[in-house]
Amino acid sequence: MRWTQEKLLEYQARNKAFKHNITADDGKECELDTKIAKYCKEQGYYAFHDYSKGKNKPGHLDFVIALPNGRTVWIENKSKEGKLSEAQKLNMVLLAGLGHEVYECRSFKRFLEIINAKPT
């Protein structure tokens, strides 16, 4: 499946999973990663985060988190100024198209909103 930039933008505009808070945490993306990993461990959630920077498949999202009741979310964290790569955008569209919950996250507050939301 190959999406044009126009088709991707249309899809994102229609799909609430790609909408996120305008406010973002100050600091680096790795600081948000650390907070999320710690929170998941404390809550007993299974959270996979690939720490092999540059050695994994291009576009792999930051977290796959297994939540209670069989709910799984895919999350790509970004800093305030961070931008999604083309590979990340395409993987997000592919996963969402397969019915998965996929989110871009720029703050710990947004992360909490995502995992505490009712499944869609």
Image (cartoon, rainbow, N blue to C red):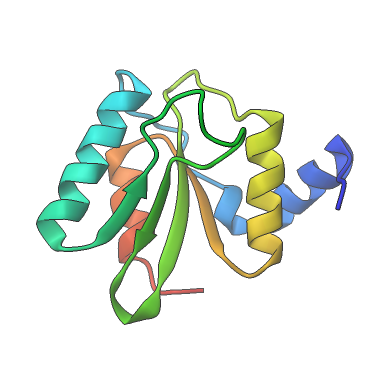
Q: Is residue 61 left or right of residue 64?
A: right
Q: Front-most of 42 and 13?
A: 42
Which residue is found at the position 33% from the left and 19% from the top? 28
Q: Residue at x 39, y 39 (%)?
A: 50
| Residue 36 picture location, percent across and down | 25, 43
Answer with the quarter of the image where residue 9 lies.
top right
Q: Left or right: 29 with respect to 37?
A: right
Q: Residue furthest left?
A: 42
- What residue is rendered at 63% in x and 49% in y? 92
Image point (51%, 42%), residue name: 61
Farthest residue toward the front? 55
Residue 74 placement (x, y as % from top left):
47, 54
Q: Nearer the viewer, residue 70 or 13?
A: 70
Expressed as whole percent of the image width and height from the top left, the position of residue 20 reads 50, 44
User: Could you say which is closer to the camera, residue 10 or residue 70?
Assistant: 70
x then y, percent, for residue 41: 16, 53
Instruction: Kindly indicate the quadrant of the structure image that contains residue 71.
Output: bottom left
Residue at the bottom extreme of this rendering = 69
Horizontal placement of 72 versus 33: left or right?
right
Position of residue 116 in the picture relative to residue 78 (left or right): left
